[in-house]
Structure formats: C-alpha cells, structure tokens
C-alpha cells in the first residue's frame, strides 16, 4: 500500500514537470518600424519576447481586455517578455510608432 502511494506521488510530479516543459517561448522583433510578424498563434501559458532590433526606441503595449500591458520604451538589443494566460485575441501596438500593429491568437 505504501509503495503504491509513493508511485502515484511520483506520477503527479512527472505530470507537473511535463506541463511546465510544454510552455513555449516565441520571439517577435521590432524592426524597420514594424513587428517582424503580423500574426502569431500560441497556446495558453506560452511566453512572447518582444525584442527591439531597431536603432531607436520602441514601446510595445496592448490595451486588449484579454491581456493589458505596457512594456515601456527600451533600446536595440533589449527584450521584454509577456506570458499569455488566457485564450483569445490580443492586439499589440507601439506607443511611439502608431502604424505598428500585430495580433497574437492565444489558443487553449
Ligand atoms: Cu515603435
């Protein structure tokens, strides 16, 4: 009985580890005053790095109900990460360059 309890405890730990390992990281650059991808489909729990590849500042933000964030302005070579924890559509923009826009589709 004791051995069985121990085994099931290990199985739960393995499942938790597997769940963590499945979350993916994506990268969306800001280059030539635009996002390097216009649309990105990810899963709930995935993280997107917004990397500035231009010689000037960008300020990535979203006013979407699903995920509101403002990464502030940062220079070339730096990135900030956002983890998306709910399914739906997120519009991402840049506060400095109004023409910059992209969409992230977060799937269950
Ligand atoms: Cu910008």
Image (spheres, rainbow, N blue to C red):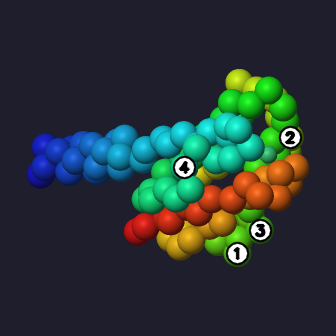
Q: Position of residue 64 (x, y in %)?
A: 71, 71
Q: CA distance from mark 2 to mark 1?
A: 22 Å
From the image, state whether disc 2 or disc 1 is nearer to you.
Answer: 2
| Upstream in sequence: badge 4 or badge 3 | 4
| Upstream in sequence: badge 2 or badge 3 | 3
Residue labelled with disc 3 = 63
The answer to whether mark 2 is within 8 Å of ligand 1 is no
The residue positioned 13% from the left and 49% from the top of the image is: 4
Q: Please state, as top left, top right, bottom left or bottom right, where the C terminus lies in the image.
A: bottom left
Q: Secondary structure at mark 4?
A: loop
The residue positioned 54% from the left and 49% from the top of the image is: 37
Q: CA distance from mark 2 to mark 3?
A: 16 Å
Q: CA distance from mark 4 to mark 2?
A: 20 Å
Q: Quadrant of residue 75?
A: top right
> In the figure, is residue 98 to the left or right of 41?
right
Disc 1, disc 3: CB below 8 Å?
no
Q: Position of residue 78 (x, y in %)?
A: 73, 28
Disc 2, disc 3: CB below 8 Å?
no
Residue labelled with disc 4 = 37
Label 2 crowd (10 A; few <14 / some 14-19 / many >=20):
some
| Upstream in sequence: badge 4 or badge 2 | 4
The residue positioned 52% from the left and 59% from the top of the image is: 39
* Residue 70 shows in the view: no
Q: Position of residue 84 (x, y in %)?
A: 57, 58
Residue labelled with disc 2 = 73
The residue positioned 68% from the left and 47% from the top of the image is: 34
Q: Secondary structure at mark 3?
A: loop
């Amino acid at each position: 009985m004791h051995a069985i309890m121990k085994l099931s405890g290990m199985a739960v730990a393995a499942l938790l580890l597997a769940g963590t390992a499945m979350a993916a990281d994506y990268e969306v650059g800001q280059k030539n005053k635009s996002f390097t991808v216009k649309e990105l489909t990810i899963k709930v729990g995935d993280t997107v790095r917004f990397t500035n590849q231009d010689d000037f500042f960008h300020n990535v933000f979203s006013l979407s109900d699903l995920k509101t964030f403002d990464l502030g302005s940062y220079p070339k070579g730096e990135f900030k990460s956002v983890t998306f924890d709910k399914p739906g559509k997120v519009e991402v923009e840049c506060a400095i360059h109004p023409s910059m826009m992209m969409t992230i589709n977060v799937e269950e």
